Image (cartoon, helix red, strand yellow):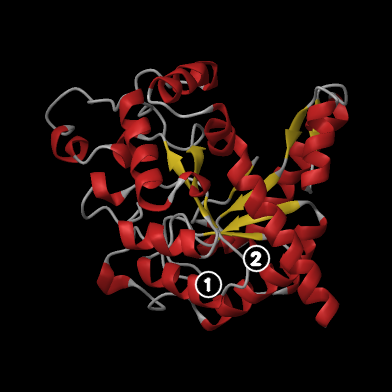
Amino acid sequence: MSIYIPAEYQETGGAKDFADSLIDMVEKFETDHPDKFDVVSSIDEVLAAKAAGKVALPLGIENGAAVEDDLANLEHFFNRGVRYITLTHSKNNQICDSSYEEPDNRKWNGLSPFGKEVVAEMNRLGIMIDISHVSDDAFYQVMELSQAPAIASHSSCRHFTPGFERNMDDEMIRKLAENGGVIQINFGSEELNAYIESYREQNPFPYATLDDVVAHIDHVVKLVGIDHVGLGSDYDGVGDSLPEGLKDVSEFPNLIEALLVKGYSDEDIEKILSGNVIRVWKAVEAKAAELQAQS
């Protein structure tokens, strides 16, 4: 469940309180419908929810603005069940620079001094670091500093969208994979197709297709192997730009069918759907246990 914090909270204040209110809302799903939902905070709890026939609801904060300027808030959110944090969103924040900011408006040239502390504390607690939305400099600094693998929870391949820093280029994908991480493909048409940006102002919106999603998955697999790609979808975040054939979650079977036709095995598809992210989550849990034992 995406605990999304709009960038405006970085200016008005109240980001932490807003995040808490959204977590309260998710917890109410479980309270109101305990037969259907489990809010989960570990791999064991995910698997238990699945075995019980329930929908597992893990928590991730999108935009580290919710941490505000207090490192102790990371432990607060960990105790509330948050297991990944996207370091920033559409604007530079107190942790790092955003990919959406113009290069001459980058505040930190990557991570801030506080952001470097955030990376270390997320490692210690066992919170996955999400590098979607961050600037390239911030990405490479996370790769250098983090002792655990990271995720790009909803990014796609810059190979197909030259100049669009929101996506990851081939070198970045290789670096993420070297560190054991996973890139999860975003379904937004702008993230999938460079042609869209130049075309859309004077023409009907040119939706990407299911084939574009498969092309991004193929590209990652050819670069770094099957163990480093997943699905980010971003169904709640890209508005009316979803690809033909994947307009909502009911159409996921279309994607599975397309992967089977392309020759992906059942084992490959299970890794793409969940296995690779579960592996990273386990590695982050293990590194946290190691770091806590050393302290």
124 left or right, relative to 193: right
15 left or right, relative to 186: right
| Three-letter amino acid code of the residue under disc 2 | Val
Query: Where is 45 relative to 203, above or below?
Result: below
Mark 1 residue crowding within 10 angstroms, few (<14) / some (14–19) / many (20+): many
Mark 2 residue crowding within 10 angstroms, few (<14) / some (14–19) / many (20+): many
How many numbered callouts?
Answer: 2
Query: Where is 112 relative to 205, above or below?
Result: below
Q: Residue at x 74, y 45 (%)?
A: 23
Q: Residue at x 47, y 71 (%)?
A: 96
- Location of residue 13 by image quarter: bottom right
Which of the numbered marks, if any, corresponds to residue 94? 1
Q: Residue at x 53, y 35 (%)?
A: 268
User: How far from the left and from the top, in percent, is residue 61?
Assistant: 62, 52
Discs 2, 1 touching: Cβ within 8 Å: yes
Query: Where is 26 relative to 120, above or below?
Result: above
14 left or right, relative to 227: right
Under circle 2, the secondary element is helix
Quadrant showing the N terminus:
top right
As measured in the structure, the alpha-carbon distance from the residue carrying label 2 to the one carrying label 1 is 9 Å
Quadrant showing the C terminus:
bottom right
Task: Tell me if residue 17 can be seen.
Answer: no
Q: Earlier in the sequence, mark 2 or mark 1?
A: 2
Query: Where is 160 relative to 33, above or below?
Result: below
Which residue in the structure is indicated by mark 2?
67
Which of the numbered marks, if any, corresponds to residue 179? none
User: How far from the left and from the top, in percent, is residue 63?
Assistant: 55, 56
Under circle 1, the secondary element is loop
